Image (tube, coloured by chain):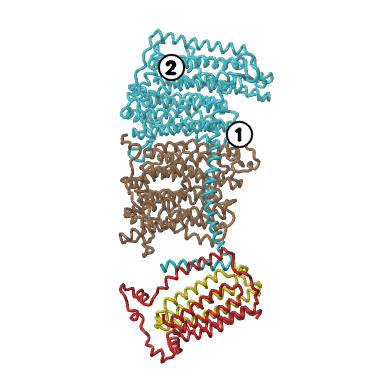
Amino acid sequence: MNVTAVVFYVFAAWAVASALLCITRSNALTSALWLVSTMFALAAIFVILNAQFIAAIQVLVYAGAVMVLFLFVIMLLNLEVVPHDWKRWPVWMLGLGLAAVLGATLLPLRNYTSDRLAREISNLPGAVNSNLVFPREDSALAVAQGAVGHIAQPLFQAYLIPFEITSVLLLVAVIGAVVLAKRKL
Amino acid sequence: MIQLVWLAVLFPLLGAVINAALAFRRPMAKTAVSIVGVGVMAAAFAVALAVFRELQQSPVASYSVVLWHWMPVTDRLSIDLAFQVDHLSSVMLLVITGVGGLIHLFSVGYMRSDPGYARYFAYLNLFIVFMLVLVLGASLPVSFIGWEGVGLCSYLLIGFWYEVDANSNAGKKAFLANRIGDFGVLIAMFLIWWSLGTLDFTGIMMQGGAHWSRGSTMPLLVALFLFLGCTGKSAQIPLYVWLPDAMAGPTPVSALIHAATMVTAGVFLVVRTAAVFTLAPVALEVVAVVGALTAFFAATIGLRQYDIKKVLAYSTVSQLGYMFLGVGTTAFASGIFHLITHAFFKALLFLGAGSVIHAMHHALHHAHSHADPQDMRNMGGLRRAMPWTFALMGIATLAIAGVPPFAGFFSKDEILGAAFARGSEHPIYYVCWALGLAAALMTAFYMSRLVAMTFFGKYRGGEKSAEHLHEAPWVMTGPLVILAILTIGGGLINLPHFAGGSSWLEHWLAPVVQVAMMMVTPTPEIPSGMETTLIALAIVAAVTGLVGGYVLTTRSSIVTPEHAPEERGIWSLLYHKYYVDEVYHRLIVDPTMWLSRRALWQTVDAFLIDRIGVGGTARLAEGLGWLGSRLQNGQVAFYVTMFAVGAVLILRTLVR
Amino acid sequence: MDTRLLLGPTLVVSAILFVLGVAGVLVRRNAIVVFMCVELMLNAVNLTFIAFAQLHGVSGQIMVFFVMTVAAAEAAVGLAIILAIFRHTQSVDLAHINLLKG
Amino acid sequence: MADFLSSIGYEHWVIHVLLGLPILAIPAILFSPVKSARYIAFGVALTELVVGIGLWWAYDSSRSGMQFVTDISWVQGFGIGYRVGIDGLSVLMVLLSVIMLPLVVWSSWRGIDQKQRGFYALIMALNTGMLGVFVATDLFLFYMFWEMLLIPMYFMIGIWGSANRLYAATKFVIYTFVGSFMMLVAIIWMVAVVAKTTGVTSFAYSNLLDHAELLRPWGAWLFTAFALAFAVKVPLFPFHTWLPDAHTEAPTAGSVDLAVILLKMGTYGFLRFAIPFFPMFALSKTTGMVMATLAVIGIIYAALVAMVQPDLKRLIAYSSVSHLGFVMLGIWGSTVESVQGAIMVMVSHGLSTGALFFMIGMLYERRHTRKITDYGGLARITPMLATAFVITAFSSIGLPGLNGFVGEFLVLIGSFGRYPWLVGAASTVVVFSAGYMLWSTQRVFFNRLTNPLNEGIGDLNLRELAVIVPLIVAMIWVGLYPAPLLKRTSGAAHAYIEMIQPVLPKPALADPEVHR
C-alpha cells in the first residue's frame, strides 16, 4: 500500500461520511454544509487522479457558487427545522430498499480493473495488454501544455459546439431564474 | 279430361281472386259474389265428374299430370308440381267439390246479412283450392302445400268475425295445433327422402317395399311421424282440442272444414301412404288404438254439451276416431267409405244446425233478447216451426246412429266388423271393437238428446221470439234435401255382400292400396254366424241409444242457461271436457311463455349477453381507465420512486 | 504509484455516493434537501468520469466540465421554482405540492 | 333476351356503373335544393334498377365460375386491385339489393322530413357498400366495402332513429367493428404467408384460394377470425343482441337495408371466404357441430324470444335472427340441396322481412308507435294493409306455396343427413314462428278497435301499394316457381360442394341413391 492509496482512502472515507451526514441531518443548513465538505473531499480525490484543473473548478464553481446559492436560498426562506423530516415509514422503507438494490447492482464493479475493461471492450478471449487498448498519454506533451492547456485544447476544438450550447443553456437558466423568482415584472 | 284436372283447381282459384277483388272494391255486390262463388264450385264439380267418368273407363289406374318443375335442385331432389289422378283422389275430388258446392249454396243464404260476404266467399273458394291440391298432390311436398293451405284457410275462416277476441284466438289455436301436426309431416318427409330417395307417393310405395323390411324401425318412425301430422289435422287424441273451439267460425265453415273435408285429410294421408303403415304393424295398432280411444273419449264429452255445434264437433272427433280405427285395421276401403258417408250426414247435421241457429238468431234478434242462439237449452219444440229441417236432421240422426237402411250403418258396421275380425290376430283389436261399440251407443244417445232438446218439448226461448221462428229459406233447405238423399243412398256405394251389394268402393280403391295389402295378412274371415250377431249387436246399440236419449231428455226438466243449476260430479267433468284445455294451457302454454319471457329474453338476452357481455366489456374499459388515472396523484415523491424503480430495473437487466 | 490502479476503489466510492444521493432523494421531504441530494448524485458521476478520464484521455474531464454547467443551471432554475412555490404555499414540503394531478 | 343484352354490349362495365353511380349521386344530392334530393335519389335508384336487372338474363347460369370479371391493379406494391365479379352465390343478392333500392327510397318519401339530403346521400353510400361487398373478389376491396357500410348505417340510425338511437347506433358499430378487426389481421396474414411462399403478393380471391393449402397450419385461428366477423354480422346466437336494438331504432329505410342485405353479408362471407379458405378446420366434426348447434339454438331461441316482444320491430328483428339461423344450418349441412336452400332463405327472407319492415314503417308513419298494444282491430279500417301483412306473415313463417317454405324446406331436408337431431329440433320452430307471427298479427289487426287514435288511420295510398305489391307478387312467384332462381345458384352450389367434398367428414345418414 503506497502513500497515494492511503491518502485516496482517507479522502474517500471523508467524502462518504460527509455525504451520509448530509442526507441524514434534519436541518437543511447543516446538510448543505456537509455537502460542501463532500465536495471538498471530492476535489482532493480529483487531484489524486491528476485532474487538477477540474478539482480547481470543483472547488471554485461547484462548492463556491452552487452551494452558496443553496445556502442563500435556505437563508432566504429561513425554514424552521422540521423534526425527522422523513416520510412515513412505508415510503422510507421503499426508498432505502431501492437504494440497497441499486447498491447491490453497482458493487460488482469494484473488481473492475483496466485490463478487464480492455478485454471487454475488445472482447478477445485471451489476456490483452491494457496499454495497447488505451494509448498511454505521453506525459511530456501534458506537462508542456500545462494542466489547463491539456484540457483547453480539445475543449475548444473537438467540443466547441457543446461548449457554445452550454453557454446558451446558462443564458436560458439565468433568464428563467429571474422570471420565476421575481415577484412581479 | 284427366290431363285437364288442374282446371278443377284453377276455377276455385279464379273464384277466390275475383271475390277478393270484389271484397276490396265493392263488398256489397252480393249477387255477383254468390254467382262467382257457387258457379266456380259447380264448374269444379263438373270437371271432377268428367275426370271420374274417364277414369272409370280407362285401363290405367293412376295418372300423373305434371304442371311445372317446382323445385329442380339436384338430380336426386327434383320436385315437380304434379297432380296424381287415381281412384282415391277422384273419389275425394267428387266429395269435396260436391259437398263443398252444396255448402257454398247454403252459405249464400246463411251469410246474406253479413258485411264481410265477399271476403267470406273468397276464403271459402281459397279453401277448396288448397283442399284439392292436398288431395291431388302427387308427392308429399305438393300435398303439403294443400295441407298447410287448408290450415291457413281454416285460421282465416274460424277467425272470420275477428272483432270478437274469442274467435281469432280459436283461429290461432287451430292453426298452431295443425302446425304441430305439420312438424310431424315435415320430419316424415325428411326421413323418407333420406332413406328412399324419393318423395312421390308412387315412389314411396315402390321403394318402401324394396328398402324397408317389415317391422323395422325406419317405416315405424315415418309412420308415427305421419300419424302425428294426421292427429293434428284430423283432431285425434293429443291434438283434437282445436276442433271444438273452431265452432267459433260461421256454421257453413264448420260444416265444410270441420266435418266434410279438412278433418278427413288425415285419413286420406294414411290411405295414400298405406304402404308405409302396413310395413310397420306397430304403427297400425297405434292408429287403431288412438282412433278407438278418441271415438270413445269424444263421445263421452258429447253427452253433456249444451251448445248444438259443440255436440256436433265432438261427434265429428268421435266419427274421425272411427275412420282411423277402420284404417288402423287395414280396412282402408271401409275407412274411406265411412269418410264419405260421414261427409254427407255430418254436413247435413251441421247445415241443419245452421238453419236452426239462423232462425233462432233471427227470432231472438227481433225479440231483442241476448240469449245464445246456439244453446239448445233456449230452443225446444222447433219441429212445428221448422218441419223440413226437423225431418232432414232426423234422417241424419238415424244415419249417424247406425240405423240399417241409412249410410251410417253400413260404414260403421264394416269398421267394427274389421276390428273384431282383426281381434283374432291381436287382442288389442277386441278392445278397440268394444270401445267402438260403446261409442256407437253414446253417439246414438247424444244425437237423439240433441234432436229431443231442439225439436221436441216446448219452446224455451221466450214468447216474443216464438212467433218470429220460421223455416229457413229454400236456398238453405235445398242443399239439405240433396244431402239427405245422399245420406239415404250413401250406403249403396259400398253395400256389403250380406246386404246383396257388390261393395263397389272396395274394388274401386283396390289398386290404390294394392301394394300395401300385399305386405299384410288379409283380414281373417269371421264365421257368418258371428257376423250376424255383430250386426244385430250394432243395431241394438243404435236403437237403445236413440230411445234412451229421447226418453231421458224429454223426461228431465231442461232449464234455460241463466238459471241452470251448476253441473256436479261426473257431469261437470264431461261438461268441462275433462279440463283438457286447462291442463294443456298450464302444462304447455304457460311454461313456454314463462321460458321465453323470463328465462330467455330477460335473463339470457337482456341480462347475460347485453348487461354482462356488452356492458361488461364497457365497464372493464372504464375500470382500466380509472386505474390509469390513479397513477397521476400529484405526489412528486411517488413519481420519483416510480422513476427510480424503472431505472433500477433497467440497470439490473443490462448489468446482468 | 500508477493512479490507474485506483480505478476499482474510485468506482466503489462513486457508487456509494450515488446510492446515498438516490436514498436522499427518495427519503427526504424537504425540496431543497432533495435538490442537494441530486447535486450529490451529480458529483458521484463526476468522480466516475474523472476515474475513467485517466484511461480514455482527457475527454472525460471535459464531460465533467459540461456536467457542472448543467448542474449549475439546473440548481438555479430549481431553486427559483422552489422560491416561487414557497411564496405561494409557505412550505417546501414535497407532500403539500400536489396541484398537478390527473 | 340474353343475346339482346350482349348485343348492346352489356358486359363487365355494368358493375362499375352499379358501384359508381350512387357515389356520383352523393355530391349531386348534397348540393341540390332540399326539395329535389328525393327525386335525384329516386332517379339514381331507377337507373340502378334498370341497369342491374339486366343481370338476371345476362348472367349465364351454365358456367359456374366468376362472370363480369374486372381486374385492374390499384396498389401495385401490395397487390391490391379493383377486382370484381359475380357468380352463383352473389348474383341473387346483387339483384335483390338492386330491386330493393328504389323501394327503399320510395318508402321513405313521406317518412323522412328533416335533413333529407343527408338521408338520401347516406342511402346511396349504403347501396354502393352493399353491392361492393357482394361483387368484390379482392379481399382488401371486400374489407373496405365491409367497413364502409358501418358509417352510413351509424348515421342513419343515429340521426333519424327514434328514442335511444345513439345507444343502438354505437352498439351496432362497436359490435361489428370488434368482430371484424381480427378479419383484417387474418387477411393480411394470409396474403403475407402466400406471398412468402409463392412470391406473388396479391389480395385476389383466386390467388388466395389456389394457395389455401399453405394456410392449413394457421387454419384454426384464421378461420375463427373470419368466423367471428361474419358471426356478428349473421347474427349467430351469442352475438345477436345488437340486431333488435339497431332494428328498433333505425328508420324504415335503415331497417330494410339492414334486414335485407346487411345480414346476408355474414352468411355470404362464410360461403365465399371462411369455409373455402380453411375447409379442413371449418368442416371438421367439432367445428361443424358447434356451428350447426349455435345456428339451431339461434333458430329456436330467437323464435321463443320473439313470442314475448312488446315492440313490433323487435319481434321482426328476432324473427330475422331465427331465419338467418336457418341459413347457417344450411351452410353447415354441406350438401348441394342445403346450400341452395341457404341461398334461397337469404333471398326469401329479404323479400318477406323487407315487406314486413316497410309495412311497420307505414304504420309508424301513421301512429308513431311500434308498441303492439297501441294498435288493435286495424283490419276493419285498413283492409289492404291487413291483407298484405297477413300474406307476408304467412310467407315469413314458411307456408308452402309462398317463398319462405322453399328455402326452409331445402335447408332442412339437405342438412337432415348430416345433423338429423339438430334438424329435428330446428323444425319445431315451425310451431313457434307461427306462434309469434299470428299472435302479433292478431293483436294488431284481428281484434276489436278500442283505441280511438287508431280510427283515423288511412289505408295504403298508391305510393305505398307500389312498394308492397311487387314484393308480394315476388313472394308468390318465388314460392310457386323458384326454378329460375335455383338454376342460377346451382352452378356455384355444385362447385362449392365439389371443392369441400374431399374434406367432408362422413354424414350421419348415407346419401339417398338417385331414382325417380
Give me the disc on residue B163.
1
**Earlier residue among tags 1 and 2:** 1
Quarter-wise, where is residue A122 in the image? bottom left
In the image, is residue B279 above or below residue B618?
Answer: above
From the image, state the color of chain C: yellow
Q: Position of residue D271 (x, y in %)?
A: 39, 48
Disc 2 is placed on an element classified as helix
Quarter-wise, where is residue B500 in the image? top left
Q: Residue type at mark 2?
A: Ile
In the image, is residue D269 above or below residue B527?
Answer: below
> Disc 1: which chain?
B
Disc 1 is placed on an element classified as loop
On the picture, is B649 further left or further right than B249?
left
Question: Is the C-beta separation of discs 1 and 2 under 8 Å?
Answer: no
Q: Is residue D445 in view?
A: yes
Q: Which chain is tinted cyan?
A: B
Q: CA distance from mark 1 to mark 2?
A: 43 Å
On the picture, is B597 further left or further right than B202?
right
Residue indicated by mark 2: B415
Q: Position of residue B339 (x, y in %)?
A: 45, 21
On the picture, is B225 further left or further right than A65?
left
From the image, state the color of chain D: brown
The residue drawn where x is 34% and y is 81% is: A131
Question: As rendered, which of B430 and B550 lies closer to the eye?
Answer: B430
Question: As rendered, which of B373 and B600 lies closer to the eye?
Answer: B600
